[in-house]
Amino acid sequence: MKQVLLVEDDKRLADLVEQFLTHHGIKVTVLERGDLVVDYLKHHQPDLILLDIMLPGSDGFSIIKKIRQTFTHPILFLTAKDCDFDHVTGLELGADDYIIKPVEPHVLLARVNNALRRAAPVTNDNSQELNFGQLHINNSMRTVSLASENVILTSHEFELLWLLANKAGEVQSRDYIHKTMIGREYDGFDRSVDVRVSRLRKKLDDDLSAPTRIITVWGKGYIFSPTAWD
């Protein structure tokens, strides 16, 4: 049974989400204060966190800053604000997705299941390892190393790297990345793909001002360079 940590101070909403997800085979633990999350994660390792932004004790942005380096499973923000700044900020801090409240229960379930499915280890052994110079990617183990150093990626960052590296040398459009990674059509304005690529570049020691490892093709998308890892 998958385990979800729900951090939400609206008790009525928290009860509804807990009951609905539990009914669909997902175990839910609820915390009503943000300042309880760090200590909880010292003793528990949920498969996914549903994290409200406006919380007593510590807000969602502060929480993700504290936990993202060690908690690599999916984090989905719950937000009542339909505001691009909140969404972009959350993604830049390492959120995998955001859900605007109020949300239809079956949509919430679909987004949770989608994130859990993408974070699950791959069990087949066909073409599950890619090597480019000093970069080694193992999809079965979901590990990455660069110049013999382990690179810690979130589940979503790993999926993005695997998607690009599997098509090394080929342009991958924002539309394709957005639909594949997030499961929704790209509307032409959503910056989530760009934010995710930027985070991935940082972790792979790419030059953010003139990237050579994950290259932007203006108006088209991104290319993973197969020759820039020596």
Image: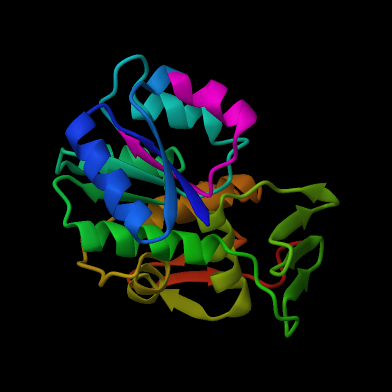
> For residue 229, what is the image quadrant?
bottom right
Q: Residue at x 44, y 60 (%)?
A: 115
Q: Nearer the viewer, residue 174 or 70?
A: 70
In the rendered structure, the answer to whether residue 69 lies left or right of residue 135 reads left
In-image side of 14 versus 162 (left or right): left
Q: Could you tell me residue 134's position as x and y percent?
A: 81, 60
Q: Report the span colored magenta.
A: 36-52
Residue at 48 percent across and 56 percent down: it is 197
> Does residue 7 lie above or below 35 as drawn?
below
Q: How many marks?
A: 0
In this rendering, does residue 168 appear at all?
Answer: no
Q: Is residue 37 magenta?
A: yes
Residue 190: horizontal and vertical position, in percent? Answer: 25, 58
Left or right: where 176 falls relative to 2? left
Percent x, y for residue 177? 41, 71
Q: Quadrant of residue 107?
A: bottom left
In this view, the residue in front, 69 or 220, is 69
